Image (spheres, helix red, strand yellow):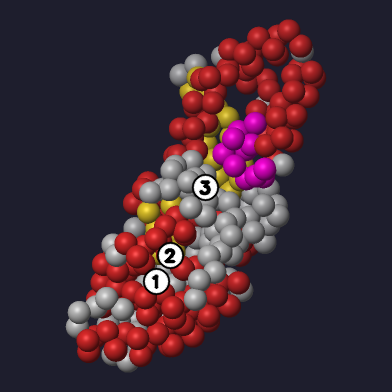
Amino acid sequence: MRRVKKPNFCVKEIVCDCAESLRDSEKKQCIIAASDVIDMKSQEYDVLAENQSLSQITEHDIVACNVTKNEMVYLYDKKFVARKEVRSKYYDKIMVLTNGICPICNLGHVRNLDHYLPKTLFPTYAVTPYNLLPICRDCNFDKKDYSFQTDDEATLHPYYDEIDNTIWLQAELQIVNDGIVVSYSVNEKSADEFFIHRCINHMKTYKLNEKYSIEAAREISDNILMWKKELDQWGEDEFLSFINEIIYSLESVHKNSWKVALYRALANNVEILNDI
């Protein structure tokens, strides 16, 4: 995962813009009347997220002023997403915050917005911009309507969590059928227990071990002949220096990418190249 700049739109304005084109005048006025409460609750969301305490928000069906879950879901689907004027003002601008790369896996291309707190369980935040994450289809599918009861069960939040303060993603190399297989996990000794639990839940929810292992297999396939040749020509010390330069370069961008974890594992187990 990588940190993304949080969208900074007025929630009350979003709700009113979405409601403006509703044909049912009674429903329209009801939603507009609820916009102040939705805005206030969204500000509370912002504070709770900053403090990693979103579990304090409970699941609900009624938003405010008798606005229901179904009405908020409709507002998101038919107005926020589907109405051209509203979509271009908000949806499209949130979609480009990551320059097209999914901030969850850092692999796939962004295809849609996902609700960090699912809109069917937490409809108050159906159009709250900092509850909307631009992610790829695979991560969106894998997450489904995942929710959590305690904060250490939460996945990492791209708008609020700083994930590169410590190196927590690790890889392990093993020889299987004359080839190198890479598995990924969280180093449980790298940070405090609360953060580690969230990293583990994040990896599990989005199936990142499987995704990263596939990418690592491609990286190895593309480079293994070169690695073996350089190791043979340069010797282990010079080859290790070369690998460490790659690690230094990768870590300057992201300390916990699948690629830098792979090269850290290779640096710790250069001898594996002699066994295949």
> How far, Cα to Cα, is label 2 from label 1?
10 Å
- Residue identified by numbered label 2: 90
Taking the spot 54% from the left edge, 23% from the top edge, the residue there is 220
Where on the picture, by quarter, is residue 47?
A: bottom right
Q: SS of the residue at dot 3?
A: loop
Q: Amino acid at mark 3?
A: Asn
Residue assigned mark 3:
99
Mark 2 or 1, closer to the camera: 2
Task: Give the mark nearest the N terminus, 2 or 1.
Answer: 2
Residue under label 1, please give it.
Answer: 127
Coordinates of residue 146 in the picture (x, y in percent): 38, 63
Identify the residue at image location x=34%, y=81%: 60
Residue 61: assigned label: none
Judge by depth and name the residue closer to the eye, 207 or 271.
Answer: 207
Q: Gap between marks 3 and 2, in whole Å? A: 16 Å
Bounds of the magenta segment: 253-263
| Vertical arrangement, residue 99 with respect to residue 70, above or below | above
Q: Is residue 99 magenta?
A: no
